[in-house]
Image (cartoon, helix red, strand yellow):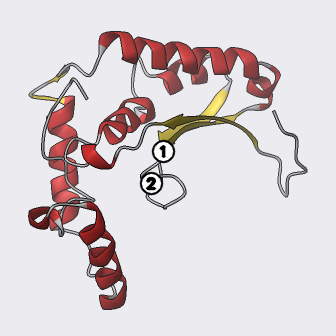
Amino acid sequence: LCSVVPVRKVHSLTITWALPPQEQHYRVKPLHYISWLVGHEGKGSVLSFLRKKFWALALYGGNGETGFEQNSTYSIFSISVTLTDEGYKHFYEVAHVVFQYVKMLQQRGPEKRQVFPTTIWEEIQKIEANEFHYQEQTDPVDYVESLCENMQLFQKEDFLTGDQLLFEYKPEV
């Protein structure tokens, strides 16, 4: 653990994992799926549990798209919890709860959990498709830069969509 002098008083707990590279799984995006589950804020979620104990204000998980966080050697996945003052006093317990949740996800696997009328995976897929189809127009230079990056990472048919859409459900990944 590291201590730093903050600009403002915010207590944050970040747990980071170094994972095998995920490039070959871009059509499945397993870390994106896990991010959605971890970031869920409804009943039964990690955040809901931590809020009931007055330990957390926010929680998010995921990995960035930068070369530092995603490359051919490794992928970085982090879960960050914004703690209350009370949560700061119990940060070991907060970390334990997060690890328990990740362990539960690992044991249960990415089953197609039913969320009426669709599964979680289908819901994520539809949301990502809508965001792709209705995204704001980007600056042409930024768009070309993004395409050039995609051309190095994805198959030809996925240059335009490979970094944004979920294509396949593969629980084994």
* Amino acid tagged 2: Asn
* Amino acid tagged 1: Tyr
Determine whether the residue tagged by mark 1 lies in a helix, strand or loop: loop
Among all residues in the image, which is located at the extreme right? 5
Q: Alpha carbon of mark 2 to alpha carbon of mark 1: how far?
A: 6 Å
The picture places residue 55, in percent across and down from the top left corner, at: 68, 24
Mark 2 touches mark 1? (CB < 8 Å): yes
Residue at image point 13% right, 25% down: 116
Q: Is residue 151 above or below residue 55?
A: below
- Residue hosting label 2: 71
Task: For the N terminus, give its image quadrant.
Answer: top right
Determine whether the residue tagged by mark 2 lies in a helix, strand or loop: loop
Tell me if 35 is positioned left or right of 98 in this view: left
Tell me if 12 is positioned left or right of 160 in this view: right
Q: Is residue 127 above or below residue 109?
A: below
- Residue hosting label 1: 74
Among all residues in the image, which is located at the extreme front? 73
